Image (cartoon, rainbow, N blue to C red):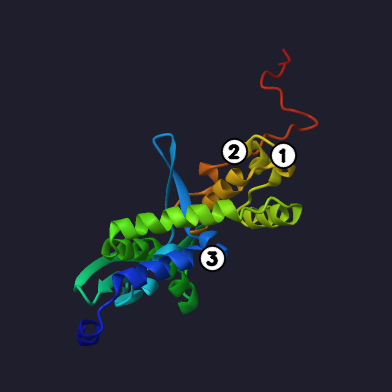
């Protein structure tokens, strides 16, 4: 804190650094996510953009740390601290050492699995903490700049579309489901739709939504048998 007071941030320089970071397509492509609320799509800054904001705004400490493990769960803290203004955001939450799979609930005992689970669940809280200490107008300007960068660099080439399909495939989303979402074939996709799909992907990747929130997931149909059972069998007298 003493060093932060001796070397306070130059807000103009810090703001310019944030804008320059948002001009990078590699950051902009993962900087925004979308989620549905009341029938409308809402766009917000992802954890990647929040981290970039903190790094470039300067004099901010942030992170996720485990406080204790007890009874098959961890107590975890996400925090962001502006050591120059002494503004602090903290969120403490519980993480059960279990993962829900199609086969049911799986108990976790490997320390690495427990760490990754806590980190994944902490990312959303960390994002909220960072955004709580960054001025709102700075965040809004960064979001707008990332929108511009994504639109200017939207790649509609076949190679880019294949890469996007492969990325969504990790979440069991098919090319056909993507095309149904955008109401056209991928070969005819527009730059604005590429931008929107990238936001949706970031939302699913960061756990802000699920694939079922955006795409029509086919339900398994009943398979007819060769000799179906007659519900009204004939009886012999």
Disc 1 secondary structure class: loop
Kindly report the distance in space between the C-alpha atoms of the residues bearing marks 1 and 3.
Answer: 28 Å
x, y percent for residue 195: 56, 49
Q: Secondary structure at mark 2?
A: loop
**In this view, 62 is above or below 140:** below
- Distance in Å between CA atoms under marks 2 and 3: 33 Å
Find residue 24 and name its label.
3
Q: Earlier in the sequence, mark 1 or mark 3?
A: 3
- Residue shown at the point (32%, 69%) measured from the top left: 12
For residue 216, the mark is 2
Please report whichever mark, 2 or 3, sits nearer to the chain's N-terminal start. 3
How dense is the environment of label 3, judged by Cα within 10 Å: few (below 14), some, or many (20 and up)?
Answer: some
Can you give x and y, in whole percent of width and height, for residue 43 in the image? Answer: 43, 48
* Mark 3: secondary structure: loop
Q: Is residue 41 above or below residue 32?
A: above
User: In this rendering, which labeled residue sits more in front, label 1 or label 3?
Assistant: 3
Instruction: From the image, tell me which residue sits under label 1.
Output: 185
Q: Quick one: 227 or 146, which is closer to the camera?
A: 146
Residue at horizontal 68%, vertical 56%? 166
- Relative to 43, 196 lies left or right: right
Q: Give the mark nearer the N terminus: 1 vs 2.
A: 1
Residue 21 percent location from the top left of the image: 47, 68
Residue 125 showing in the rendered view: yes
Between marks 1 and 2 in the image, the one whose residue lies nearer the viewer: 1
Expressed as whole percent of the image width and height from the top left, the position of residue 129 reads: 30, 64
Q: In the image as oriented, which residue stretches furthest toward the front?
A: 12
Closer to the camera: disc 2 or disc 3? 3
């Amino acid at each position: 804190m003493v060093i932060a007071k001796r070397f306070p941030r130059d807000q103009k320089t810090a703001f310019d650094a944030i804008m320059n970071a948002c001009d990078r397509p590699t950051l902009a492509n993962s900087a925004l996510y979308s989620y549905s609320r009341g029938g409308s799509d809402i766009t917000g800054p992802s954890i990647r953009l929040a981290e970039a904001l903190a790094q470039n705004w300067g004099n901010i400490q942030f992170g996720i740390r485990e406080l204790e493990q007890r009874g098959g769960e961890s107590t975890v803290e996400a925090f962001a601290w502006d050591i120059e203004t002494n503004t602090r955001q903290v969120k403490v939450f519980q993480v059960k050492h279990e993962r829900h799979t199609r086969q049911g609930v799986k108990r976790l005992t490997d320390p690495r699995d427990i760490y990754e689970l806590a980190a994944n669940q902490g990312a959303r809280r960390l994002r909220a903490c960072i955004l709580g200490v960054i001025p709102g107008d700075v965040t809004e300007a960064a979001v707008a700049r990332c929108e511009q960068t994504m639109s200017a660099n939207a790649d509609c080439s076949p190679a880019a579309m294949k890469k996007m399909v492969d990325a969504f495939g990790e979440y069991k989303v098919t090319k056909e489901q993507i095309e149904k979402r955008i109401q056209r074939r991928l070969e005819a996709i527009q730059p604005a739709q590429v931008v929107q799909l990238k936001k949706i992907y970031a939302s699913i990747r960061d756990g802000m939504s699920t694939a079922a929130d955006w795409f029509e997931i086919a339900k398994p149909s009943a398979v007819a048998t060769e000799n179906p059972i007659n519900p009204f069998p004939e009886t012999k007298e």
